């Protein structure tokens, strides 16, 4: 985990400063110029002394609960205030921050992240406040544009129209040298199917009357009479004839 201003992660990852207590102004000036060349994003939680040079970067942001602590620069050996370096620090701050501070003193003057956001600094927590250096804007494809337009202005034709629109977009979004494939749309009509016509089937021919069911007074043709020794289908011929006679 990278905590300090002088120990960044590999580019182009953002530099997240959790707590930096400052140091030699020359070291922080060199690191600030490197971030400026790389177009790096720097996010501030707690930043003191020479670390406040980060406020001069175009891609710096602060968290609402951040604490930025300002004071005059001083000689590390003699501990005497260096007015020239202090003036360079003050001149690096945005104009709104300079107006709020007024001047620097040997004692810390603290501005919170909320105050700095009110002065125009970028909020790291806002949706538009996070930026990755070097990121490229993705160009939407023709299919995505057609889908977005369909959502904004729905087509009254319903699913069939959306499928046609998607097929047209897919056909024309291919390589220019490849001719678009033909688009075929099949729409099924709902029609009632009439039942097949009735076919008249002739009845089978009637069977000739059996002797068992022939009344006594009916003349039986010679070809239908019983052969000698043959018996009718029903054993009780007399019963069957009497039943038919009734």
Image (cartoon, helix red, strand yellow):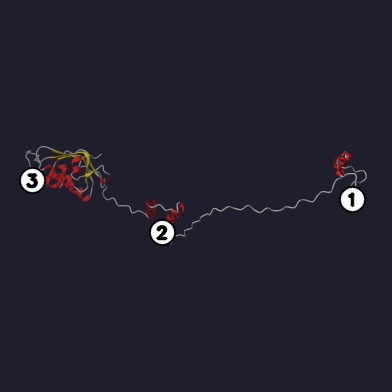
Q: Examine the rendering and report whether any part of residue 93 can be seen.
A: no
Indicate which disc, 2 or 1, sits on the residue closer to the N terminus. 2
Q: Quadrant of the C terminus?
A: top right
Tell me if I can see residue 240 in this picture: yes
Question: Which is more toward the observer, 145 or 208?
Answer: 208
Apparent side of residue 47 relative to residue 135 in the rendered image (left or right): left
Name which of mark 3 and mark 1 comes first in the sequence. Answer: 3
**Residue 124 sits above or below residue 171 on the image:** above
Task: Please rate how many residues cluster around mark 1, counting C-alpha atoms within 10 Å: few if below 14, some from 14 to 19, many from 20.
Answer: few
Q: CA distance from mark 2 to mark 1?
A: 89 Å
Give the mark toward the camera: 2 or 1.
1
Q: Which mark is residue 223?
A: 1
| Residue annotated with mark 3 | 84
Mark 3 or mark 2, which is nearer the start of the sequence? 3
Front tag of 3 and 1: 1
At a point 15% along the width and 46% down the height, the residue shown is: 96
Q: What element does badge 2 sit on? A: helix
Residue 2: give x, y in percent of width and height.
Answer: 24, 40
* Mark 2, other Cα within 10 Å: few <14 / some 14–19 / many ≥20: some
Where disc 3 sits, the SS reads: helix
**Hey, which residue is sitting farthest right in the picture?**
228
């Amino acid at each position: 985990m990278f905590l300090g201003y002088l120990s960044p992660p590999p580019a182009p990852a953002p530099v997240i400063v959790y707590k930096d207590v400052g140091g030699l102004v020359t070291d922080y000036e060199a690191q600030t110029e490197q971030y400026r060349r790389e177009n790096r994003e720097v996010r501030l939680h707690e930043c003191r002394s020479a670390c406040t040079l980060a406020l001069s970067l175009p891609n710096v942001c602060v968290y609402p609960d951040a604490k930025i602590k300002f004071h005059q620069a001083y000689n590390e050996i003699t501990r005497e205030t260096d007015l020239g370096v202090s003036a360079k620090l003050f001149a690096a701050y945005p104009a709104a921050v300079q107006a709020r501070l007024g001047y620097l003193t040997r004692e810390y003057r603290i501005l919170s992240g909320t105050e700095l956001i009110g002065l125009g600094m970028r909020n790291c927590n806002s949706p538009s406040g996070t930026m990755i250096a070097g990121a490229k804007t993705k160009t939407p494809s023709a299919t995505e544009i057609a889908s977005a337009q369909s959502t904004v202005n729905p087509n009254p034709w319903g699913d069939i129209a959306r499928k046609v629109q998607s097929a047209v977009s897919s056909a024309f979004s291919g390589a220019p040298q490849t001719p678009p494939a033909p688009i075929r749309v099949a729409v099924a009509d709902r029609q009632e199917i009439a039942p097949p016509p009735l076919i008249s089937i002739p009845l089978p021919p009637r069977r000739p009357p059996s002797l068992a069911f022939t009344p006594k007074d009916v003349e039986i043709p010679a070809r239908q009479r019983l052969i000698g020794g043959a018996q009718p289908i029903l054993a009780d011929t007399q019963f069957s004839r009497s039943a038919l006679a009734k």
